């Protein structure tokens, strides 16, 4: 089960990297905003579910509490992502973005980076706990 946890952590890291790619490609897409960011939103939901699954797998495998807690933190940060978007949109007026809304929306990317940093820590610690080979970083 510990190796499954490490595999899930690696899959979650990959999903977050793909999220950044999808966000960037959506930002430069000529389609409507709704259509351009649809893949990013759909994978975002999958990322949260994967983070929850990672947390449960850590608990079932009886991994150290700090590792389970960090996995849960990733799930919490993932749930925060759409909240940031809603708050940022609340600053807009009839679909127009404002400076305040753009600043709040910037937190979406910063939160994504925080998720990546926490998942990296989880992945490193789970590899150390299972004796899995570490990648060159």
Image (spheres, rainbow, N blue to C red):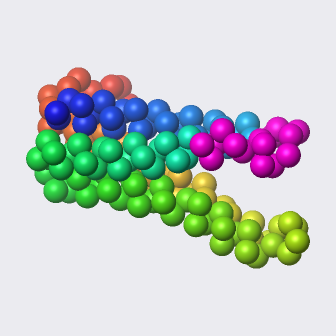
Point out residue 24 in the picture as x, y percentages from the top left corner.
70, 41
**Depth check, front residue: 132 or 41:** 41
In percent of the image, x 73 and y 36: which residue is there?
25
Q: Is residue 67 above or below residue 89?
A: above
Q: Is residue 11 above or below residue 59?
A: above
Residue 100 in view: no
Point out residue 78 in the picture as x, y percentages from the top left corner.
48, 55
Point out residue 47 in the picture as x, y percentages from the top left corner.
47, 44
- What stretch of residues is rendered in magenta? 27-42
Residue 125: quarter of image:
top left
In percent of the image, x 16 and y 45: which residue is there?
60
Would you say 66 lies left or right of 11 here? Answer: left
Residue 108: quarter of image:
bottom right
Point out residue 114 in the picture as x, y percentages from the top left corner.
46, 55
Would you say 106 lies left or right of 11 here? Answer: right
Would you say 122 lies left or right of 13 here? Answer: left
Q: Is residue 71 above or below residue 46?
A: below
Would you say 70 lies left or right of 76 here? Answer: left
> Is most of the magenta stretch helix, strand or loop?
helix
In percent of the image, x 60 and y 54: which residue is there?
109
**Which residue of the protein is positioned furthest toward the left in this rendering?**
62
Quadrant location, the C terminus: top left
């Amino acid at each position: 089960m510990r190796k499954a946890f490490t595999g899930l952590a690696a899959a979650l890291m990959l999903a977050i990297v793909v999220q950044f790619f999808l966000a960037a490609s959506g930002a430069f897409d000529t389609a409507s905003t709704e259509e351009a960011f649809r893949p990013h939103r759909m994978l975002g939901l999958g990322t949260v579910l994967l983070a929850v699954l990672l947390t449960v797998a850590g608990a079932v495998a009886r991994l150290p509490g700090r590792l389970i807690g960090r996995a849960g933190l990733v799930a919490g940060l993932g749930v925060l992502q759409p909240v940031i978007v809603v708050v940022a949109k609340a600053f807009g007026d009839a679909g127009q973005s404002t400076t305040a809304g753009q600043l709040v929306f910037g937190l979406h990317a910063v939160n994504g980076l925080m998720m990546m940093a926490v998942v990296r820590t989880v992945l490193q610690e789970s590899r150390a706990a299972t004796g899995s080979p570490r990648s060159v970083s």
